[in-house]
Image (cartoon, grey):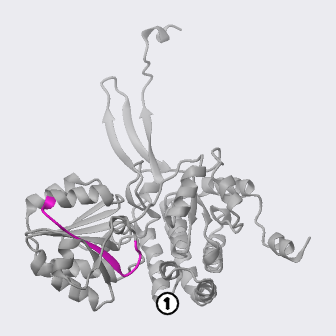
Amino acid sequence: MNAAAEKRSEHASPDIREQALAARAAGAVIAALSTAAKRDALDAMADALAAQSKEILAANAHDVEAAEAKGLAAAMIDRLRLDAARLAGIVHALREIAALPDPVGQVTRREQRPNGLAIERVRIPLGLIAMIYEARPNVTADAAALCFHAGNAVLLRGGSEAIHSNRAIAAALHAALRAHGLPEAAVTLVEDLRRETVMQLLQLTDIVDLAIPRGGVGLIRFVAEHARVPVIKHYQGVCHLYVDARADLDLALRLAIDGKTTRPSACNALETLLVHKDIAPAFLPRVAQALRTRNVELRGDVVSRTLVLDMKPATEDDYAAEYLDLILAVRVVDDLDAAIAHIRRHGSDHTEVIATRDEAAADKFVHALRSAVVLVNASSRFSDGGELGLGAEIGISTTRLHAYGPMGAESLTIERYVVRGDGQIRHAESARI
């Protein structure tokens, strides 16, 4: 065995099937925990992350340095990077998750049938979740906590660019689990980073209940194309702000600045600005000046460029792009219907925003679009599990399955029927004994 092979062998993970089986067994233990026991463990996980913050940030600095040396895109490096504030945010998210209502065992519907049967629909854990993601070391903690709160085990397969960060975070979570006498396998970090290992994981239909990919289009397509287990996709965030004819222009300006510039690498950042033709002459020069001072590059259609002379021309590809950068596509539209048609053509069903004081226009915008999150007079940056009261999110589903939009703990459960009777039978002949 050569030196490179020895190094790979030294860090090789156990067989992925064995890891998955161990995680599934651990999941049965977690599913049986009381709400109080889960909250205590989650609070301990948050405490462990805070206590080991120095080690986690040092590991992350190692990953960021390596990523910069490899020339990874600025958006990916931003998603990879942790600092004291971001780590504190992760700790806070875990405490918020711990304080949320327990979804497991919730009765979502109850009715009595004419024959006396009592029918309940009750939430239960999904089972074993496979989380496959790039960069974003926060996902390691967020996914672990959300799955745990919902009574599930999780397999965490992060990218090579975040391996040291993920190991440090997982080590803290495992310390908390051990302290509570719980199996570490409930939060399993898959350290075998080979692509073939992911492919094997995605074939485990008898063990894995759901796969959730988070990352670039390439990763998501790879998972969707190779998976035999169910997949909920977190696709591109081609998010729009439409400024209506009856918009408050000061409000719309704030939405544009916040949506584009506060964290352009986020999937809920604005990528396209649509402006009604009647207010474009008053609004576009203002927003262009404000964004220009924040180093945003604008790419617009012919009408937009007559109003903002230094704006670059936009192509049709620009209107379908998820830039994840300080670039914004701009188009002047004739009316609300034209804005809706543009979003239907170029959008990714992620997040759309309308700025308007016309309630009828707002209602039409909301009902005409089927995107996972639609906001009226609020920033696209609120399309986030933490901001919407979920504590954190495991992703923003753009797949119309049992979960759509930001996914919290409740989205990691399913409803089943519990039927209570008193000897009822369906066919009369069954009564003959």
7 shown above or below 338 = below
In terms of depth relative to the viewer, which is nearer, 266 or 101? 266
> Which x, y percent locates residue 231?
52, 51
Residue at point 42%, 64% (across, down): 236
Q: Is residue 74 above or below residue 407?
A: below
Image coords of residue 268 (percent x, y): 36, 70
Q: Where does residue 188 sit, x and y in percent of width and height?
A: 65, 65
Which span of residues is magenta-colored? 323-336
Q: Between residues 229 and 342, which one lies in front from this camera angle? A: 342
In the figure, is residue 296 to the left or right of 205?
A: left
**Which residue corresponds to the image point at 44% horizontal and 37% vertical from the top-left?**
418
| Residue 211 is one of the magenta-drawn residues | no
Q: Quadrant of the N terminus?
A: bottom right
Residue projecting furthest to the right: 1
Q: How many marks?
A: 1
Secondary structure state at the residue bearing disc 1: helix
Amino acid type assigned to the residue bearing label 1 in the image: Ala
Quarter location, residue 264: bottom left
Which residue corresponds to mark 1?
84
